[in-house]
Image (tube, grey):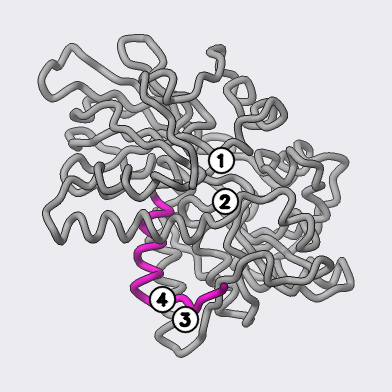
Amino acid sequence: MGYELTVEGLRDLAEGAAVLGTGGGGDPYIGRLLVEQQLHAGRGIRVIGVDELPDDALVLPSAMMGAPTVFVEKAPSGAGNVIALRALERHLGRTAAATMPIECGGINSMMPLLLGAQTGLPVVDADGMGRAFPELQMETFAVYGVPGSPMSIASDHGDSGIIDAVDNRRMERLARAMTVEMGGAAYICDYPMDAATVRRTAIPGTLSLAMKLGAALRVARAEHADPFERLSEALAGTIYTHGIVLFTGKVVDVDRRTTGGFARGTVTLAANDDPADEMVITFQNEHLIARRGGRVAAIVPDLICTLNSETGRPVTTEALAYGQRLAVYAISTPGLMRTPEALACFGPEAFGLSEPYVPVEQLTGEPSPSPA
């Protein structure tokens, strides 16, 4: 059953989404403030299960596109959100029945909620990544046969356009170029589909999962409990099944640059009890691979999260800084994201990594419980 989003629920959702953003996806804080402003103005946001829509209902996923570092320098206003939606509706000659996230991690957990408040559309509790990924073709929608275009793209200045690409990878390249020209950040609606297709291709319940993770961290801080134990307890019985602390230490080096519309680089952490023991994480907006002593500790598409070692608060790639005390926390992805077809789309090879995918529970030797 659906529910009305409250301010407290929104805050929990934003923090949980930052965890699922795996270092990327953009800090949801800015998006949360935009949504909170709508709630304080008396506008409602209804989150629904996809089963609440008829099969032929049109769902238009919405998001922001660009390098997370850009949002730090210039906060989005949210105006382009509605512009992108209306542009795609006009192009399709149909009105959307709902919107939904293309990714549940980071700021893109917030943009569909903002759009729901701005337009009155319900927001489907599901997404196409189960985390955050840096490129538009890296969607379970795409893996299971949904074309991403026609898609719309808009800026806060009122610019808009339609991209009708020959394939999803080409769509990403064209949209990335337009995003750069729009100042490094843009609003998009893509993967237009009916509710029956959403049911077949989306990862269900991810907004509610993010809210559950955020609530677990909030309560852990209030009770002075171990935030990582609480995260693992919250994940147990879900389709994610498994969470574990891989490493705890201090940031001793950050190599970060914004290029081609992405934040790329590495962060190096030294263990608290042995400075010679280091973990190096490579990222492209999101964390892709964690190596300890040159050996793989976790690899995409499993989630690699950098969290404050005392509070569990997520630290995004654009906020990484020398001296931070962090825990590297890994989460196993749902089975839908581990099929050969999914790994071909957003597994290690898709990012130019030579290492093969090995599930994090196998790398850590931990048992993998079954979802409830």
Q: Mark 4 points at which residue?
A: 36
293, 30: nearer the viewer: 293
Kindly state the secondary structure of the residue where label 3 is placed.
helix
Q: Name the residue under label 1.
A: 133
Is residue 333 placed above or below 53 in the rendered structure? above
Give the residue type at disc 2.
Answer: Glu
- Please tell me the numbered disc located at residue 103: 2
Residue 171 in the figure: left or right of residue 9 = right
Kindly state the secondary structure of the residue where label 2 is placed.
loop
Query: Which quarter of the figure is the N terminus placed in?
Result: bottom right
Where residue 143 sits, quadrant-wise, is top right
Q: Marks 3 and 4: CB-CB under 8 Å?
A: yes
Q: Where is residue 106 in the image (x, y as percent from the top left)?
A: 46, 52
Q: Marks 3 and 2: CB-CB under 8 Å?
A: no
Residue 81 in the figure: left or right of residue 32 = right
Measuring 67% from the left and 58% from the top, which residue is drawn there? 188
Measuring 13% from the left and 25% from the top, which residue is drawn there? 272
Q: Mark 3 points at which residue?
A: 38
**How far apart are labels 1 and 4 at the CA level?**
25 Å
